[in-house]
Amino acid sequence: MELPSRLEIALSKLYNAFHDGTLHPEYCTKCAVGNICNNLEFWTHLTDAHGSVKLNYVGLVNQNFGKRFFGYTPLELLHIEAAFLKGCGYELPLNGTNKKPENPKDNSVLFNGLTEAVKVLCKLDNIPDVMNYSKLFETENHKPRYQLSDILV
């Protein structure tokens, strides 16, 4: 399956951050969107709270003028980040009193967050979730309905 360029680049950055151990949900330059945005923090000025999907004035201006950052609109970036944080187990927005995971650097926590972020990334480009392997477990007459090669094409 040919992936849109912005999706392929975003997935590559998230994959590298996960495997390099540089992914961290509580740091704006190391979270999902921070990594997509080359570890820059400018995107935090698009909203008033980390994890919020509500654009502030700066975010609205950029959104209304059609600005894109690394291929994504301000609102798309906020939705990607919110999905990542929720998937990691955070109650949004992040504020010090809301629920959060005991160990945000735990690989299973980060994987769950990435699963949700990738789901949103794929939906934004109208393609099937690249992390959904549920078809591999579908059966017909007690035999696999699909082969691995059918799924990964």
Image (cartoon, rainbow, N blue to C red):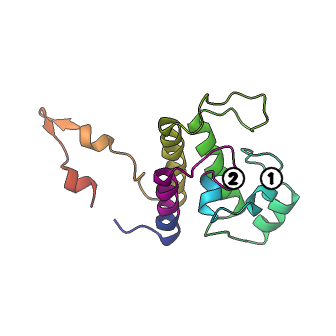
The label on residue 78 is 2
The label on residue 131 is none
Asked whether disc 2 touches disc 1, contact meaning CB atoms under 8 Å apart, the reply is yes
Q: What residue sits 68% from the left and 70% below the top?
A: 68
Q: Is residue 149 above or below residue 106?
A: below
Viewer-side residue, 126 vs 70: 70
Q: Is residue 71 above or below residue 144?
A: below
Magenta-highlighted residues:
10-31
Q: Which residue is mark 1?
A: 47
Q: What residue sits 48% from the left and 58% below the top?
A: 16
Q: What residue sits 16% from the left and 40% below the top?
A: 144
Where residue 21 appears, as percent x and y from the top left, is: 52, 50
Q: Is residue 15 magenta?
A: yes
Q: In the picture, residue 61 is in which quadrant?
A: bottom right
Q: Earlier in the sequence, mark 2 or mark 1?
A: 1
| Amino acid on which disc 2 is placed | Leu
Mark 2 crowdedness (10 Å alpha carbons): few <14, some 14-19, many ≥20 = many
Secondary structure found at label 2: helix
Question: Could you tell whether 61 is left or right of 130 in the image?
Answer: right
| Amino acid on which disc 1 is placed | Thr
Where residue 1 appears, as percent x and y from the top left, is: 33, 65
Secondary structure found at label 1: loop
